[in-house]
């Protein structure tokens, strides 16, 4: 083990990457690193940043503000939002840790963030950039559409509810597929949910124009609403075969009052800072992606706690999720396809979330590093406004403010089965189409694997997103 973290947040590191860099002590009183710090090799700098981030996060978790401040200052000499993968990640993780520290002084935090304007249109723009720069959403759409085509074979009235309607490309592809059905296209109604009316208006116009050209009876039903405020009962209509598409949306409904759940959790007797940091990180001279560094070298010493285990308590902790799934079940969908992040960012302890988030976002930053130049403005926007904001929410926020509560497929399977849904195995044809899409775009390093009838989208061997299909099942 690299060392132990004491209750006061300090660490007695007996062996770590920092032994290679004696000038980078975390002890108070040491001056700023020398100018040649930036001349470190990428691997050496990356390993240092991993160690420093973990130590700093431990200080933040333990409330040791002075030591955390020293750690943030030292990380700032190595991190950079326009550097290599680890430098970029470190820049956003340190910002998130600093934001969490600032929340101890609500007045100061509010004053520093008073002029920040969160734009819904900007959020939609950055989602579209993510769609263009990475294949994950494209793959999700292809797999979802194939499942819909198979489930709706022979149906004459089809209704699709899109819980995250922002990108018309998915439904453009579906319209083209439906137009080629041997029995002819069905009457199609799509209900799009989004907080911005303009986005829905643009989508409705594009889809209506295409449906007319393809001679498909079509109706677009826009609903301006937050997901949590949606009245699903109003969407019920008899005589229609219903499909639901949820892409990276359901986890936001898990936001709850953590203190209520925590009071009933056995993990509250444990102090997250009493765990060992990690074993020694050895510098590997061979080229590896950052995701591979973290998978191989960063030990997940913060194991699953009862909070994040597959327990009835953790599944029932969000009343919004329970009522939403009950309402969906009440609509008797013939098919529901769900895409979610394949990582556990919903642990109670900060260190659980930091460790999981480092692994997950390391792979996402690596994806962009492999395909987009470092100076790309589009890449910087995705990293700052999408990944950076998600990281900040996961690390800096608690309670109902923490919306990015990503959970793994095994937890979604249990939650959905308890809600009355039955799994629908995704077909080999859907996986084949997704694989062909990767080949046609020349995406290297991405993999798709089958797991329990669901599909997992990976960067190399790191699972990043899951796609699962479900149907209404009557209670026995």
Image (spheres, rainbow, N blue to C red):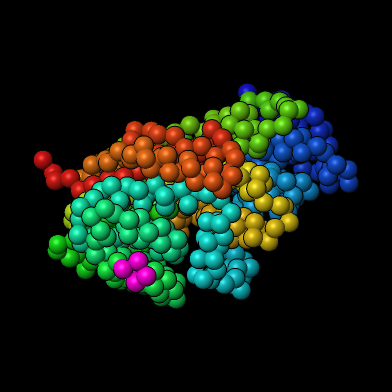
Q: Which of the 4 image quadrants contains residue 359?
A: top right
Whether residue 415 is in magenta: the answer is no
Q: Is 217 situated above or below 48?
A: below
Q: Residue at x 57, y 72 (%)?
A: 117
Q: Left or right: 471 with respect to 247?
A: left
Q: Which of the 4 image quadrants contains residue 245?
A: bottom left
Residue 168 position in % (x across, y down) = 43, 64
- The magenta region covers 211-215
Q: Is 350 situated above or below 238?
A: above
Q: Left or right: 323 with respect to 375?
A: left
Q: Left or right: 198 with respect to 76?
A: left
Residue 300 position in % (x across, y down) = 54, 31
Whether residue 214 is in magenta: the answer is yes
Q: Quadrant of the C terminus?
A: top left
Q: Quadrant of the N terminus?
A: top right
What type of secondary structure mainly makes up the magenta span? Answer: helix
Q: Residue at x 64, y 60 (%)?
A: 378
């Amino acid at each position: 083990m690299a060392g132990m973290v004491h209750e006061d947040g300090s660490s007695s590191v007996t062996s770590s990457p920092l032994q290679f860099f004696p000038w980078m002590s975390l002890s108070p009183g040491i001056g700023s690193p020398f100018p040649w710090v930036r001349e470190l090799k990428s691997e050496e700098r990356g390993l240092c940043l991993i160690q420093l981030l973990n130590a700093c996060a431990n200080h933040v978790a333990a409330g040791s503000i002075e030591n955390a401040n020293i750690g943030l200052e030292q990380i700032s000499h190595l991190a950079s939002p326009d550097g290599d993968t680890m430098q970029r990640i470190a820049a956003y993780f340190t910002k998130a840790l600093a934001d969490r520290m600032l929340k101890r002084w609500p007045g100061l935090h509010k004053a520093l963030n008073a002029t920040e304007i969160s734009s819904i249109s900007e959020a939609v723009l950055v989602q579209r950039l993510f769609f263009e720069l990475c294949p994950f959403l494209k793959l999700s759409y292809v797999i979802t559409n194939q499942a819909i085509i198979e489930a709706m074979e022979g149906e004459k009235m089809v209704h699709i509810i899109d819980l995250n309607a922002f990108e018309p490309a998915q439904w453009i592809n579906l319209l083209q597929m439906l137009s080629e059905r041997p029995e002819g296209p069905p009457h199609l109604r799509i209900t799009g949910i989004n907080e911005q009316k303009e986005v829905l208006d643009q989508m409705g116009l594009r889809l209506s124009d295409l449906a007319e050209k393809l001679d498909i009876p079509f109706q677009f039903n826009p609903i301006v609403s937050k997901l949590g405020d949606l009245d699903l009962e109003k969407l019920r209509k008899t005589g229609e075969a219903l499909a639901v598409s949820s892409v990276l949306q359901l986890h936001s409904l898990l936001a709850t009052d953590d203190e209520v759940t925590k009071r009933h959790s056995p993990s509250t007797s444990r102090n997250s800072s009493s765990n060992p940091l990690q074993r020694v990180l050895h510098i590997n001279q061979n080229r590896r992606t950052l995701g591979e560094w973290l998978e191989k070298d960063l030990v997940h010493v913060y194991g699953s706690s009862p909070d994040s285990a597959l327990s009835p308590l953790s599944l029932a902790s969000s009343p919004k999720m329970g009522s939403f799934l009950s309402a969906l079940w009440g609509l008797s969908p013939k098919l529901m396809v769900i895409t979610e992040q394949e990582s556990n960012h919903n642990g109670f302890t900060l260190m659980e979330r930091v460790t999981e988030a480092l692994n997950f976002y390391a792979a996402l930053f690596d994806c962009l590093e492999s395909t987009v130049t470092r100076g790309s403005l589009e890449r910087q926007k995705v990293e700052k406004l999408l990944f950076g904001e998600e990281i900040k929410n996961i690390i800096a926020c608690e309670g109902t403010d923490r919306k990015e509560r990503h959970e793994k497929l095994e937890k979604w399977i249990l939650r959905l089965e308890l809600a009355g849904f039955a799994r629908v195995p995704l077909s080999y044809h859907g996986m084949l189409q997704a694989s062909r899409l990767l080949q046609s775009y020349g995406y290297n390093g991405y993999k798709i694997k089958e797991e329990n009838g669901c599909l997992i989208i990976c960067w190399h061997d790191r699972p990043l997103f899951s796609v699962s299909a479900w149907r209404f099942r009557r209670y026995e």
